[in-house]
Amino acid sequence: MNLKDILIMEVPSGALKLVFKAEGLSGKTITEEIAESIATEKPSRASELASQFQFAGSTAVNVHILMSKISTEWHSKDFFKSYLINKFGESLFVNGIRPALTDKPQLMRSYDLGDKLVLAFSFLGSQKRYMENYEVVVRRPQMLEYVIIHLSFFTRNTI
């Protein structure tokens, strides 16, 4: 996916317009044109903006799982990361993998962000009907969900 598409899909239009104006760009009013202008004229700023909204979503859920019965080796980010690499390969942390899409979430990408790991899962969403070329077409969009594992907690606390 190119940077312009990421900006359009992930970054709120208000944030795009603020960056557009702050970077001294002008002459565009349509969100797609603004995103394209930022992506082509200020690519480093566009990448920074995309990364700020990469894991943004409409719902945030905090889940606290009792860890007392889990071996302490799992408290280490390096152990957890090496397990994922052994099971899914190095590409999981580089470009991601492309598992078959089903109703069940499948791990497709991992990100190492300092003291946390982000796991990206993909699955098929609910069926939607569209009119395309005068016919009804049924599609199931690809959905993404993220799990952020804060491993710094284990280095500060005793389980």
Image: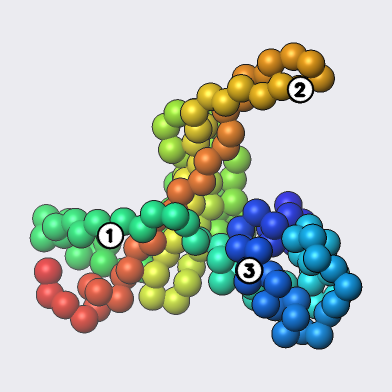
User: Do the residues under discs 3 and 1 have CB atoms within 8 angstroms?
Assistant: no
Check disc 3 and report its element: helix, strand or loop: helix
Label 3 vs 1, first from the N-terminus: 3
Amino acid at the residue labelled 1: Asn
Q: Nearer the viewer, residue 12 or 157?
A: 12
From the image, tell me which residue sits under label 3.
14
Amino acid at the residue labelled 2: Glu
Q: Nearer the viewer, residue 134 or 83?
A: 134
* Label 2 Cα neighbours within 10 Å, binned few <14 / some 14-19 / many ≥20: few
Quadrant location of residue 53? bottom right
Q: Is residue 152 left or right of residue 45?
A: left
From the image, tell me which residue sits under label 1.
62
Check disc 1 and report its element: helix, strand or loop: loop
Name the mark nearer the viewer: 1 or 2: 2
Marking on residue 142: none
Tell me how the rendering is colored.
rainbow
- Give how far apart the Cα atoms at labels 3 and 1 are: 27 Å
